[in-house]
Image (cartoon, rainbow, N blue to C red):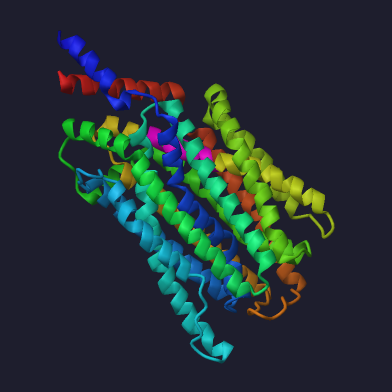
């Protein structure tokens, strides 16, 4: 009788069912807003600072570095707080997204305004610098408030090894799809509006609306599944929660976690350095127009989108490591090739953009598919689920690396003699030293980052077999507690 009752409960348990399409789509939509805003920021914010606001490249890179460092610092704190959040109506993660969505959109928009503190452009630089630092810090805070709880929901929606890869495929379909959408919008707006400042402002406004709507779609679409997980989690007896710094020690003693954050750091350092320098490369090294930048970026992102589900299916057959190696190898070839491209070799440029896109998709998919496995290993070892703090520190270290990368790019451009411009004036001709610095940033530097990621992936210890053993032991523990 007891067994049959347990079986009946299991059949009614929504967590025992596969995720339906509606829930996967809603979850994917949660990354639409952060992806659209982050994509526009990564590709255009540095060039907006130098070519529209008229801020020197070194100061522009410093603004981005300060924002990213603060963004990294607040990640573990928000992750820790979301783990501690209690809400019968929304669970642990969803309140943060619900209440943070509108402020997130507003402060993203404010980054693209150019207030005039002085009629003299040289006297306007430092007030603008501090304005963008302040807005950047607040904007990055709200980015964390909505995005970190979202990323921590993956292991709560499904505990299946392969279904997590599928779920992340939907997530990054929206992520890359949102990136492509933002680039298409940029292409249309830049063609229609000649005033660069007005064009960026309109682009920011449209992206803000899309971002807020996507976040609310996710909140209401996954709520039932998340609340079912929360109800089950609360019923399960857990050891008394450890102090924050004690949790840090445990997190960083988790060896697979160190591999994952290293893989993610080097992968995304390659992505973001390339993304921030590509507009300069297209305009200055390939002698194309600013309106040509979105088409090059769309080639990368569209390829990455198409490859997501290919890699997702292939990973079920050959494993995550092999998929990562295949994708990164093509990207390394493309990154190295970009260094040697000359004006007029447009077809080759697009071929390399497609090759890079094939690799970029694995940078999206594989590290995030590894993280839930790491969290379950920690649960087996400690008896607690700490998605928030794990994801928080993963993103913290990644953003510290990105902050350094953006600072390095901006200051390298300034040291090399790069000439900034202001809205309404023609773009200046760059010296050979600046052109060479742009080529180094688009080719050799990302190549080194990707090679480091490959080395770490080779030694990553959790296989499909090891994960199956972890889940079996967790199931046995839950059954003992329930008996």
* Residue drawn at (21%, 34%) of the image: 231
Q: Relative to 296, is 432 above or below?
A: below
Q: Is residue 366 magenta?
A: yes
Q: Residue furthest top?
A: 1
Q: Is residue 391 magenta?
A: no
Residue 52 percent location from the top left of the image: 61, 75
Nearest the eye: 416 or 36:
36
Residue 312: quarter of image: top right
Q: Is residue 274 visible?
A: no
Residue 237: quarter of image: top left
* Residue drawn at (59%, 77%) of the image: 56
Residue 352 percent location from the top left of the image: 73, 47
- Asked if residue 458 lies left or right of residue 440, the reply is left
Q: Is residue 229 visible?
A: yes
The magenta stretch spans which residues? 364-374
Query: Which corner quadrant holds the N terminus?
Result: top left
Nearest the eye: 251 or 406:
406
- Asked if residue 116 lies left or right of residue 7, the reply is right
Residue 220 percent location from the top left of the image: 34, 44
Q: Residue furthest front?
A: 192
Nearest the eye: 125 or 211:
211
Nearest the eye: 78 or 48:
48
Q: Relative to 383, is 243 above or below?
A: below
Residue 281: quarter of image: bottom right
Residue 341 percent location from the top left of the image: 79, 55
* Residue drawn at (52%, 24%) of the image: 316
- Asked if residue 193 lies left or right of residue 269, the reply is right
Query: Which corner quadrant holds the C terminus?
Result: top left
């Amino acid at each position: 009788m007891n067994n049959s009752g347990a079986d009946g409960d299991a059949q009614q348990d929504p967590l025992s069912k596969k995720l339906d399409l509606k829930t996967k789509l809603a979850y994917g939509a949660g990354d639409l807003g952060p992806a659209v805003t982050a994509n526009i920021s990564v590709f255009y914010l540095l060039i907006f600072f130098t070519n529209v606001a008229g801020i020197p490249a070194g100061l522009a890179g410093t603004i981005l570095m300060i924002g990213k460092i603060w963004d990294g610092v607040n990640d573990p704190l928000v992750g820790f707080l979301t783990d501690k959040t209690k809400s019968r109506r929304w669970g642990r993660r969803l309140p943060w997204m619900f209440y943070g969505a509108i402020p997130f959109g507003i402060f993203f928009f404010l980054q693209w305004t150019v207030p005039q503190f002085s009629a003299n452009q040289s006297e306007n630089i430092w007030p603008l610098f501090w304005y963008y630092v302040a807005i950047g810090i607040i904007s990055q805070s709200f980015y964390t408030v909505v995005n970190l709880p979202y990323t921590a929901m993956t292991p709560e929606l499904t505990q299946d090894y392969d279904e997590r890869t599928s779920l992340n495929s939907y997530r990054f379909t929206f992520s890359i799809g949102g990136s492509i959408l933002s680039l298409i919008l940029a292409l249309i707006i830049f063609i229609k509006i000649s005033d660069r400042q007005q064009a960026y402002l309109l682009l920011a406004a449209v992206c803000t609306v899309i971002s807020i709507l996507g976040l609310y779609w996710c909140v209401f679409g996954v709520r039932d599944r998340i609340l079912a997980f929360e109800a089950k989690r609360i019923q399960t007896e857990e050891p008394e929660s450890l102090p924050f710094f004690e949790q840090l020690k445990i997190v960083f003693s988790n060896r697979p976690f160190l591999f994952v954050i290293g893989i993610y750091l080097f992968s995304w350092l390659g992505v973001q350095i390339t993304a921030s320098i590509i507009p300069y490369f297209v305009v200055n090294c390939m002698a194309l127009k600013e309106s040509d930048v979105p088409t090059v970026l769309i080639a990368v992102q569209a390829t990455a989108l198409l490859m997501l589900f290919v890699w997702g299916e292939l990973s079920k057959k050959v494993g995550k490591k092999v998929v990562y190696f295949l994708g990164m190898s093509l990207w390394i070839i493309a990154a190295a090739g970009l260094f040697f491209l000359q004006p007029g070799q447009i077809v080759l440029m697009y071929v390399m953009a497609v090759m890079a896109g094939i690799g970029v998709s694995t940078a999206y998919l594989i590290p995030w598919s590894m993280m839930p496995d790491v969290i379950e290993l920690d649960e087996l070892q400690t008896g607690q689920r700490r998605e928030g703090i794990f994801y928080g520190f993963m993103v913290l270290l990644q953003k510290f690396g990105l902050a350094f990368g953006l600072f390095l790019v901006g200051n390298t451009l300034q040291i090399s003699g790069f000439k900034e411009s202001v809205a309404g004036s023609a773009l200046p001709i760059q010296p050979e030293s600046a052109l060479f610095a742009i080529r180094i940033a688009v080719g050799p530097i990302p190549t080194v980052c990707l090679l480091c990621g490959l080395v770490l992936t080779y030694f990553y210890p959790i296989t499909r077999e090891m994960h199956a053993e972890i889940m079996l032991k967790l199931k046995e523990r839950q059954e003992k507690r329930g008996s």
